[in-house]
Image (cartoon, rainbow, N blue to C red):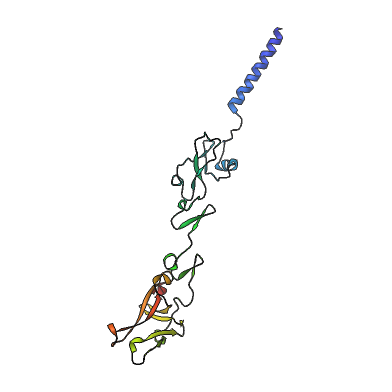
C-alpha cells in the first residue's frame, strides 16, 4: 500500500512538474511575433491592418479618425463580435475616402492617386491641356517659333484700316497668330478666356499700331500666349 501511495505521489509530482513547465514555457501565443511580417501573416481580417511587433507581441494602432494614422492610411472600424462590444478602430493601410489622401489626390481602390485634371490652364504644366481627365502635351502649334512679319490679315473695309483682322500664318496655321514676345516669337491659338489655353498660357489681345484708330491700336484677335515657351 505504501509503495502504491509513493507511485501515486510520484505520478502527481510528475504531472505537476509537467504542468509547471508548460506554464513557464507556454503554448505559442496567437499574438507572438519575431517581426511585423509574422503579424501580417496572422492577420485574418482582410482589412490590411497596420501591425507592429512590440516586445514579441503583435499590436495594432488605435485611432479615432484617419488623422490619427500616418499619411496614406485610414482609421478602420473592426467587426464587432456582438452588439454589446464597444466599437474598436485601428489604423489600416491605404485610403478609405478622398480625405485620407494628400491635397490634389483622390482615393481609388484604396490607393491615393493624382486627381484628374478639370482645366488645363489651372491643373496642368506648361504647354499641357486637360484631355479626358489627364494632362497631355498641347502639341502643335503651341510654342512653335515663327516670324511675325508673315502674319496674314483681312483688311476688311478698304476705307477702314481699323477693321483689320488676323487670318493666319504659314507656320502657325489658318486662324492662328504669330506673337512677337520679348524673348522671341511663337504661335498663338484663338481663345476667349484664359481657361481656353494650356497651362502656363494666358489669353491675350493681339494689337497692331494704327495711328488713326481709337487708342492708336488695332485689335486683330485674342490668342493664347506665353513667354515661358522660350524658358523651357
Q: In this orientation, which residue lies closer to the viewer: 192 or 74?
A: 192
Residue 20 in the image: above or below residue 162:
above
Q: Give the residue drawn at x 45%, y 52%.
A: 99
Q: Give the residue drawn at x 68%, y 13%.
A: 8
Residue 114 in the image: above or below residue 25:
below
Image quadrant occupied by the C terminus? bottom left
| Residue 198 placement: quadrant | bottom left
Residue 169 in the image: above or below residue 92:
below
| Residue 17 placement: quadrant | top right
User: How many numbered circles are shown?
Assistant: 0
* Residue 88, percent from left and from top: 50, 38
Left or right side of 198 for 17:
right
Q: In this orientation, which residue lies closer to the viewer: 87 or 28?
A: 87
Image quadrant occupied by the N terminus? top right
- Point out the residue furthest to the bottom here: 158
* Residue 208, percent from left and from top: 34, 84
Q: Give the residue drawn at x 69%, y 10%.
A: 5
* Residue 199, percent from left and from top: 43, 69
Residue 66 visible at all: yes
Residue 232 visible at all: no
* Residue 159, percent from left and from top: 34, 92
Amino acid at each position: 500500500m505504501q509503495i502504491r501511495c509513493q507511485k501515486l505521489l510520484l505520478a502527481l509530482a510528475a504531472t505537476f512538474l509537467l504542468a509547471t513547465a508548460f506554464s513557464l514555457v507556454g503554448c505559442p501565443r496567437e499574438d507572438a511575433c519575431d517581426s511585423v511580417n509574422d503579424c501580417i501573416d496572422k492577420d485574418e481580417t482582410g482589412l490590411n491592418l497596420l501591425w507592429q511587433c512590440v516586445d514579441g507581441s503583435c499590436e495594432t494602432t488605435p485611432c479615432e479618425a484617419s488623422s490619427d494614422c500616418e499619411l496614406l492610411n485610414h482609421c478602420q472600424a473592426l467587426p464587432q463580435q456582438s452588439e454589446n462590444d464597444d466599437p474598436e478602430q485601428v489604423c489600416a493601410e491605404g485610403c478609405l475616402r478622398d480625405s485620407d489622401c494628400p491635397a490634389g489626390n483622390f482615393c481609388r481602390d484604396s490607393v491615393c492617386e493624382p486627381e484628374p485634371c478639370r482645366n488645363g490652364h489651372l491643373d496642368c504644366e506648361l504647354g499641357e491641356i486637360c484631355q479626358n481627365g489627364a494632362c497631355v502635351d498641347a502639341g502643335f502649334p503651341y510654342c512653335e517659333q515663327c516670324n511675325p512679319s508673315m502674319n496674314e490679315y483681312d483688311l476688311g473695309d478698304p476705307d477702314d484700316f481699323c477693321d483689320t483682322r488676323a487670318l493666319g500664318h504659314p507656320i502657325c496655321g489658318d486662324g492662328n497668330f504669330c506673337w512677337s514676345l520679348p524673348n522671341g516669337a511663337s504661335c498663338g491659338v484663338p481663345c476667349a478666356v484664359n481657361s481656353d489655353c494650356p497651362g502656363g498660357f494666358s489669353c491675350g489681345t493681339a494689337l497692331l499700331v494704327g495711328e488713326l484708330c481709337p487708342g492708336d491700336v488695332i485689335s486683330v484677335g485674342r490668342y493664347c500666349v506665353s513667354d515661358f515657351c522660350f524658358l523651357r
